[in-house]
Image (cartoon, grey):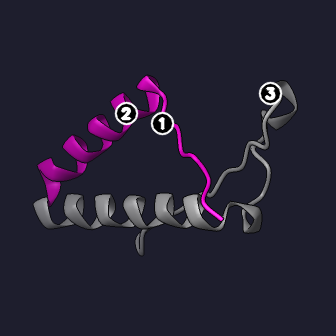
Amino acid sequence: MSFQISISQRAKRDIREIVNWIKERSSKGALRWLDTLEKTLRELETRAVSCGPATEADDFDVDLRQRLFKTRRG
């Protein structure tokens, strides 16, 4: 079963800022971080039921899930 992933404008802005910050230190690190994010989003899209409910799930009329991730170094 596939679920719809919605990324807010704020999250998109945050992603750009994070990638730019990492890229200043390591272009390979930025690519690894983006790759990890994309894999996490695919997992959430295909296996959302295995992910916990989002903190704000009670505020919405949909089954809102979250999947936190971290890279090897945190």
Q: Which residue is mark 2?
A: 12
Q: Amino acid at mark 1?
A: Ile
> Which residue is outermost to the bottom?
72
Labels 2 and 1 touching (C-beta < 8 A): yes
x and y, in percent, of residue 27 in the image: 11, 59
Q: Which quarter of the rendering shows the N terminus? A: bottom right
Nearer the observer, 73 or 18 = 18
Q: Earlier in the sequence, mark 2 or mark 3?
A: 2
Q: Amino acid at mark 2?
A: Lys
Dot 1: element = loop
Magenta segment, which residues? 1-26
Q: Main secondary structure of the magenta part?
A: helix
The percent coordinates of residue 16 (x first, y second) are 27, 37
In the image, residue 62 lies in the stretch drawn in magenta: no
Which residue matches tag 3?
60
Quadrant hosting residue 2 = bottom right
- Residue drawn at x 75%, y 44% is 54
Q: Nearer the viewer, residue 40 or 15?
A: 40
Tell me the number on the disc at residue 7: 1
Q: Residue at x 54, y 45 (%)?
A: 5
Secondary structure category for the residue under label 2: helix
Upstream in sequence: badge 1 or badge 3:
1
Instruction: Kindly indicate whether the residue at mark 3 contacts the one at mark 2 (C-beta within 8 angstroms).
Output: no
Instruction: Work out how far the residue at label 2 is from the one at label 1, CA to CA, in angstroms.
Output: 7 Å
Going from N to C along the chain, the mark reached first, 2 or 1, is: 1
Q: Residue furthest front?
A: 1
Image-based side of 6 in relation to 14, left or right = right
